[in-house]
Image (spheres, rainbow, N blue to C red):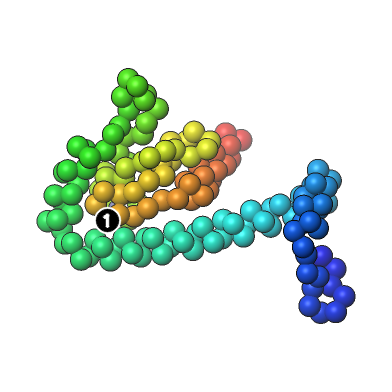
Amino acid sequence: MLPDQDGQGWLLERRHVEALLALDSHPSLWALTMEQEDRYEGSAQKQDEREREQASRTLERIGEDEADRRAAAAADLHDGPTPDDPYALELQECPVCDYEAFSSDDGDELGMRVGTGECLVCHYRRSPAIANAIARQMEWERCWERD
Ligand SMILES: [Zn+2]
């Protein structure tokens, strides 16, 4: 971070931050946006953990029969690709309950087909920040494998 004169750090006002971001094309300041991004992703990850915990509890509460019933109904509730909307995502496997019941409203920004939306069985919700983080990871792994 920034130099520290009195042990408390400097209090940055918004205009300072904006001025620094304006200078961000300078390589030594790249770290600034990276740190911002890390913090944003960190809180999204925490939120995602809470979502997963809550979804696991929902899954326990409803029991296996009800989960099966919801999974069977999911296909009718989900709007997959249509001629009008050919890029809509099919139901995906939910990372919490493993049913093919994750209903995406939209996909990640890289077009890796990682959905954001809600599972129709356990109600796990995946935020755009998490979908984008997963997509970036997939993209990174793909590059890694190519080398
Ligand atoms: Zn689920």
Q: Is residue 134 visible?
A: no
Place of residue 130 in the rendered image (x, y in percent of width and height, measured from the top left):
48, 50
**Image: 67 above or below 50:** above
Residue at position x 87%, y 75% in the image: 5
Q: Residue furthest top?
A: 83
Q: How many marks?
A: 1
Q: Is residue 7 above or below residue 80?
A: below
Quarter of the figure with the C terminus: top right
Residue 62 visible, this orientation:
yes
At x 18%, y 54%, the residue is 67
Residue under pointer 1: 122
- Residue 76 location (% of width, % of height): 19, 37
* Side of 45 relative to 68 (left or right): right
**Farthest residue in the bottom direction?**
7
Residue 82 screen position, x and y as percent:
31, 24
| Quarter residue 78 falls in | top left
Q: Is residue 112 left or right of residue 35?
A: left
Q: Nearer the viewer, residue 137 or 60?
A: 60
Q: Which quadrant holds residue 55?
A: bottom left
Q: Quadrant of the N terminus?
A: bottom right
135 left or right of 40 in image: left
Taking 131 as reference, is 80 left or right? left
Task: Give the residue displayed 85% in from the left and 79% down from the top.
Answer: 6
Answer above or below: position of 137 versus 89: below
Residue 98 coordinates in the image, percent (x, y): 28, 51
**Mark 1, residues whose alpha carbon is within 10 Å: few (<14), some, or many (≥20)?**
many
**Mark 1: secondary structure:** loop
Mark 1, ligand 1, within 8 Å: the answer is: yes
The amino acid pointed to by label 1 is Cys
